[in-house]
Image: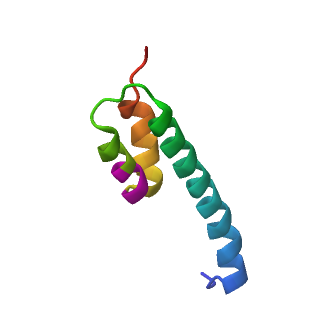
Amino acid sequence: MDQLTNSQLMTIILPLAIVQFILMIIAIVVCARAEQTRGPKWMWILIIIFGNLLGSIIFFLVGRKQA
């Protein structure tokens, strides 16, 4: 198996990092604007930030309270 060059690696990682960052920002905004969440908002913000991609997905699946 050939080794990936730096440019090949960047073409793989950069789009994923951009998607992760955008999803994290959207999750933080949704959390901040939500009237109620399942648990304290500060906890969800920390989960979103430190959980990276998985933290954002968990917030959207579990953290939001539907009206």
| Residue 13 percent across, percent down from the top left | 62, 68
Instruction: Please tell me which residue lies in front, 12 or 41.
Output: 41
x, y percent for residue 44: 35, 43
Q: Is residue 30 left or right of residue 63?
A: right
Q: Is residue 26 above or below residue 5?
A: above
> Does the stretch in magenta take in 63?
no
Q: Along the horizontal axis of the image, is 57 left or right of 50?
A: right
- Seen from the viewer's position, the closer of residues 59 and 29 is 29
- Residue 5, visible in the rendered structure: no
Q: Is residue 23 visible?
A: yes
Q: Position of residue 65 (x, y in %)?
A: 39, 23
The residue drawn where x is 59% and y is 63% is 17
The residue lying at 44 percent from left, 57 percent from top is: 52
Nearest the camera: 26 or 14? 26
Residue extending furthest left?
Answer: 39
Colour basis:
rainbow
Q: Main secondary structure of the magenta part?
A: helix
Tell me the quarter of the image containing the N terminus.
bottom right
Q: Position of residue 66 (x, y in %)?
A: 43, 18
Count the marks: how many? 0
Q: Which residues are magenta?
A: 46-50
Residue 39 to residue 17: above or below: above
Q: Quadrant of residue 11?
A: bottom right
Q: Could you tell me which residue is drawn at 66 percent across and 68 percent down?
A: 14
| Quadrant in the picture for the C terminus | top left
